[in-house]
Each structure stands twice: as C-alpha cells, then as structure tokens.
Image: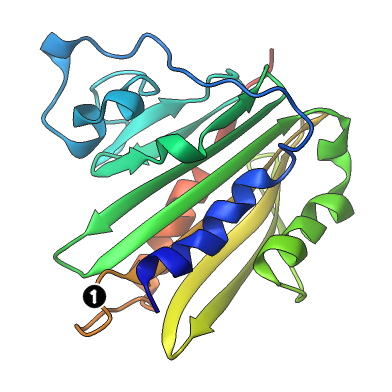
C-alpha cells in the first residue's frame, strides 16, 4: 500500500468538527530569520510561524503555539506542518497536521490535532464517536487522568495488503469548560521493503510524549 493511502485516512480526520464553519489560515509572528536554527521545522516557512522560539523546550522539540491561543504542544524539530490540512475557525476550532520522517529508523510519524473550544467539546460520547466515523474504530477506550486532564485513549492497527499503520489516539479533555482535543498519532514505514520497528515501545512512547505535552490555556 502506498504511504499516501495510509496517511490519507488520518488526513480525513481534519474534517472533524470543521464542517459548516468559516475557515481561515495564516501564521503568528514567528522567530526572526536571524535567530532561526537550521532544522526542518524552522526551514519550513509555514511551520516556523507557529513556533514560540528557537529554544528547545525538551531535547529535539520546540514549543508550538496554537493560533487560537488555546493550547501548546511540543513540536519535533525535524517535523513540518501539512499546510493544506490546516484549518481554523476563529478561536473555536483548529485542525493541525504535521509529519516527521526518521530516515535512519525508516519511520514516518503523522500527527493530527483537532482543537475545539465550544460546548460540544463537553460531549465525550460525541467526540469518541468521531474515531468510529473516521478511523473505523469501535473498540474500548482507556480512561485516565494526568495533571487534571482526562484522556480517553485507544490504539489500533490499520492494515492493507499486509502493510500496517500503527495508530495511537485519544480524546483529551482538560478541567476547563468547552475545551477538548481529538489527537491521533500514526506510524508507518517509509519503505515497507526495509526493516521497520513500528511496534516498538520506543515508538509508542515517542507518540505518547507528544500527546501528553499538550497544555491547554485559559483565556
């Protein structure tokens, strides 16, 4: 299966909650050219406008700031945003997709973050049903709380013609009214004819570290 077919399933999730809204796009005042480090994230004109500074918040990650000012997340320095997938409707909705390719490990990571700041974010059942609609996932979710944020977490494997995409996803609900995020991290092989450790604990931990780095902001 072509890699684009595997990632296409994830890209469709960008429609979660975006229908019927007036959408806009654009960037913040990002880091100036003189201070920009030589990384994939800062070499991408669209991506760098979302990065708070050139300083790494943890090793290999910058701080990504949502244009809604509703959340931040750790952004891999070797990742870039999918500009075509970006959507925003005022401060109430934002869809972000970004990809990181690890050529050495033959792994491609695609992340999707859909942010909501409206009453429907409080409807947990509605938000979990989105994973059924767009990922064909009908299984159970593990509910747990970490730092006053509740996670409804699951993982699955999408397989087509023997080629697998490992998916880690959750609805993330902070202790703030009307806010929530649908998160998906998908891991594929860059070249399926070469060794690829998609199912390693290190790979899973990498995705979950991104998920747990999401920090909601009150306005």
Front one among 70 and 149: 70
Is residue 159 rendered to the left or right of residue 54? right
- Say which quarter of the image contains residue 44: top left
Is 160 drawn above or below residue 44 in the view shown? Answer: below
Q: Locate residue 75 relative to residue 186 in the image: left or right.
A: left
How is the model colour-coded? rainbow
Percent of width and height locating residue 23: 64, 24
On the image, the x and y values in percent for residue 87 come to: 58, 31
Q: What residue appears at the point 37 percent right and 68 percent down from the top-left corner?
A: 3
Q: Please identify the quadrant where the C terminus is shown.
A: top right
Residue extending furthest toward the bottom:
162
Q: Is residue 151 visible?
A: yes
Q: Is residue 67 above or below residue 100?
A: above
Residue in the image at 62% along x and 52% along y: 13
Front-most of residues 179 and 106? 106
Q: Position of residue 42 (x, y in %)?
A: 22, 28
Local packing at callout 1 (Cα closer than 10 Å; few below 14, some 14-19, many 20+) is some
As displayed, is residue 27 above or below residue 15? Answer: above
Quadrant containing the N terminus is: bottom left
User: Which residue position holds label 1?
Assistant: 191
**Residue at screen point 47% across, 51% down:** 111
Quadrant in which residue 135 is drawn: bottom right
Residue 142 seen in the current view: no
Q: 129 or 63, which lies in front? A: 129
Q: Quadrant of residue 177?
A: top right
Classify mark 1: helix, strand or loop. loop
Tell me how many marks there are: 1
Q: Whole-percent x and y of residue 52?
A: 36, 19
Q: Who's the residue at 88% across and 55% down the image?
A: 125
């Amino acid at each position: 299966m072509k890699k684009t077919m595997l990632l296409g399933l994830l890209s469709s999730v960008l429609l979660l909650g975006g229908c019927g809204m007036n959408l806009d796009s654009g960037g913040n005042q990002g880091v100036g050219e003189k201070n920009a480090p030589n990384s994939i994230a800062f070499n991408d004109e669209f991506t760098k406008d979302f990065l708070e500074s050139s300083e790494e918040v943890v090793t290999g990650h910058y701080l990504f700031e949502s244009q809604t000012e509703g959340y931040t997340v750790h952004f891999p320095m070797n990742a870039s945003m999918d500009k075509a997938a970006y959507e925003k409707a005022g401060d109430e909705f934002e869809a972000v997709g970004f990809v990181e390719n690890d050529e050495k490990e033959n792994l491609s990571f695609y992340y999707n973050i859909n942010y909501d700041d409206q009453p429907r974010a409080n409807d947990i059942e509605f938000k979990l049903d989105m994973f059924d609609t767009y990922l064909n996932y009908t299984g159970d979710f593990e509910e747990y709380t970490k730092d006053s944020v509740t996670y409804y977490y699951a993982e699955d494997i999408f397989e087509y013609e023997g080629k697998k995409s490992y998916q880690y996803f959750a609805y993330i609900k902070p202790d703030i009214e009307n806010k929530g995020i649908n998160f998906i991290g998908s891991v594929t092989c860059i070249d399926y004819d070469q060794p690829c450790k998609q199912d390693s604990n290190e790979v899973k931990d990498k995705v979950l570290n991104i998920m747990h780095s999401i920090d909601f902001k009150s306005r």
